[in-house]
Amino acid sequence: MQIKDFKAIVETFADPGTEMLFEKTQVVIQVNGDLIEANISSDSGDVYIDEGSGKEPASKWIVNRLARLQLLAARLSSSVMPTNHFVIPAAGLLPTLESGPEEEIVTTENALATTIETLNNRSPLETTVLYITSDAGEGKTSLINEMSRAQAKLFTENKTDWLMVPIPLGGRHFLRFDDITIGALQNRYRFPFLYYNSFLALVKMGVIVPAFDGFEEMFVESSSGEALSAMGILVGSLESQGAMIVAARKAYFEFENLKTQERLFDSIRNYSVGFGKIELERWAEKQFIDYCNNRNIPNSKELYQKVSERLGTEHAILTRAVLVKRLIDVVNESSSLDGFLEKIQQSGTDFFSAFVRSLIEREANEKWIDRSGDKDVGAPLLKVEEHCDILAQVSLSMWEAKVDYLKRENLEFVADYFSEVNRKDNYEAQQIRERIRGHAMLVPSSNSEKAVEFDHDEFRLFFLGEGIAKQLLPMTKSTQAEVFSVFRRGVLPPQAQHALVLALKREANTRLLDIVKFLLEISGMDVQTSYTHENCSDIIVMLLDGIKGYGISLSGLAFGVDILRDKKLNGIKFVDCYFSPTSLELTEIDECELHNCDFSQIRVYNSTRVSNVIFDECVVDALSRPEEGVETWDPVDIKRQVLALGFTFTLEDGAGDVQDEEFKLDLELRNIEKIIRYFMRSTHISESVIKIKLGPNGSGFIENELPRLIKNGVLEEIENRGGMPQRRFKLNPSLHLINEAIARSNGSFEKFLQYCSNEN
């Protein structure tokens, strides 16, 4: 370590208002109220520190003396709770372009070992951002926690030189990584010895790898961008050093709409950053049997066969870790597995509701027994539906407070409110207040003392949807205000929306059109660019899926991401609506009208079906055909492709002119689009990567187009810090400018160059 780096790092540990002093061969610094004096020397260009027990390298002194990472390792071991009966999932590894330019998926049966090995072998020439992706309830959090514990153990045994620090984001919609990071260190791990800047310095040194867990609902295209912006600031502050893990359902570079990626990329494009991904696979028979064996369940193979014969091997109850755990609870605690499986089988798409109610039955009938003496001996204190109601109230309280836990006093308030509304007497109310803390669906929270949270977010979001449905169904003025208050808190997560829609269809299937009209009234209480509008809009389309919507006119709504995917819409009129980027995979639209609507992006598939649909004065910013690897921003080409899909233009909209015009996308511009997408995987890419990605067109691109792109300021050659003698490039303009240039080029490579040159 050089003296300049030493000073910069050590100053981040100094107490506010104090300075680091150098006097001849001594350094003096105040850290956490302690005055540290040490001798400083240089040997072969490296800095050494001596506090009286002998010289040691400056980096080691920082790690052990200032950062106290041995203590942090101990706190992680004690504070990060082990996952009971943990089963290591299988996964597919997509390495960074620096490590694997061929982009071949590496399959592994041990996601834990592969992830740690990937981080051990990360490139020192760039910041490594490794995503852990999967659907909810498939083990991302458990994997991060187990990796953190494993690394902490190795660190205390001096077998590794870095720690993984889990930082739960807790579903926060407005991200401040400094507050969240230091809050996690102090509150969760009881480690008050690091400031945010010193934490970042340790990440840049490579001795800490933060694992941000909780991008589930905010790291999506429909967000206002705060998650992307905050992450861009964080990655940029690492200055092409260190590594971090991000747990999410989808990696940033997988978004098919380049405009979505602008915020993050434009904030990090001047740094060297490589993105990789570990995609967890759903459980198969092996993981199911391993879990059963961990819990000492006899005849685990026979159990798997019995369940799979009734539900199929791909059913979520067999493939998702959180549901397998609860299934085994049923096996352990009930003698009626056949009855349980029959309920799940008969419930079809609404299986989760039947699953949860089956879990609650034992709680209601065997544990929550009324002890007041006023009822028959052994009578349940609450019915199953009442259990669902009180848990829905708990989830609603969490949603309104924007947290995923409730403190004891708030939980008791919910219990008392429930008792009051349901006219429970004093004895019953007292029992409910005392027992709610130990409910089978609730567990002690690690976020706060004397607080509880749901056993898994899947259950919290299910009860949130159920609770909103119960609020909404009376469809009165008072319930309108209640639902409006809930909707304006934030965009409901997809699981909550799904649970809400299923609950409405279960309880009021014959009144769906009335519910749609009621939601339209609620959406009218807020502006179009609001959470209220997006929630109402998405739920309305989900309710109209598969039914005749003749006479329904949706005006001024704003729809979320992929809202049209796998929807069957019939007879609906859309006026002045805005659609976020949406897939039309498995979508069928029949006898609908769209007037003056804006589409951010449409993704068309072979399974898309459109018939008798009027497309009047609508604007589509981008149209993509993922199966063909093509995306276009040209208005004329978009109109032609929309017309070919089966949409009908009005005469005023110029459909005839579109049919007569010819559009041609230059091969050079198509190659540019491909290369730009690879810059989303690595901010700086080499000549060899370009050749690999363009295949047969690679050599011609290097010889002919590349010099012109450099001359016109699209690409810029930078220093090659690797071992191979080859050129290395970065994007010179912002991604926003490049997107605009592609959109305005009308498929012409020459016009694209001209626009970029003028802007530069």
Image (cartoon, rainbow, N blue to C red):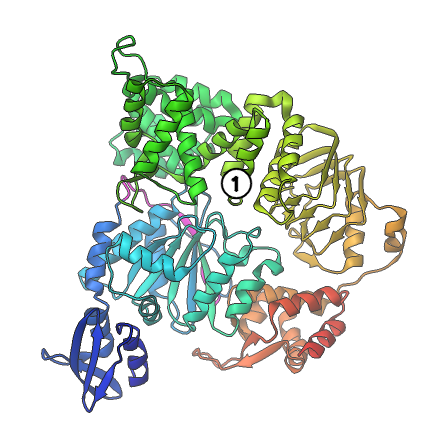
Q: Is residue 265 left or right of residue 610?
A: left
User: How many marks are shown on the rendered structure?
Assistant: 1
Q: Which image quadrant is residue 662 in?
A: bottom right
Q: Position of residue 559 (x, y in %)?
A: 64, 44
Q: Quadrant of residue 295?
A: top left
Residue 138 vs residue 735: left or right? left
Q: Name the foreground residue: 327 vs 102.
A: 327
Considering every residue shown, the one lying at the far bottom of the view is 24
Locate residue 131 relative to residue 575 in the image: left or right.
left
Residue 745 falls left or right of residue 500: right
Q: Amino acid at mark 1?
A: Pro
State the extent of the magenta-drawn residues as a range.
83-99
439 falls in the magenta region = no
Q: Which residue is mark 1?
A: 494
> Which quadrant is the N terminus positioned in?
bottom left
Q: Quadrant of residue 522?
A: top right
Relative depth, front residue between 317 and 648:
648
Label 1: how many Cα within 10 Å (few below 14, some 14–19, many 20+): few
Q: Position of residue 572 (x, y in %)?
A: 74, 34
Residue at x-position 68% and y-position 78%: 704
Magenta: predominant secondary structure element?
A: loop
The residue positioned 55% from the left and 29% from the top of the image is 479
Looking at the picture, how far across and down is residue 344, in whole percent? Answer: 46, 23
- Identify which residue, 538 or 484, lies in the foreground: 484
Q: Is residue 88 magenta?
A: yes
Q: Secondary structure under badge 1?
A: helix
In the rendered view, would you say 221 is above or below 431? below
Q: As drawn, which residue projects farthest toward the top?
A: 376
Residue 154 in view (yes/no): no
Q: Would residue 706 be seen by someone viewing this image from the given angle? A: yes
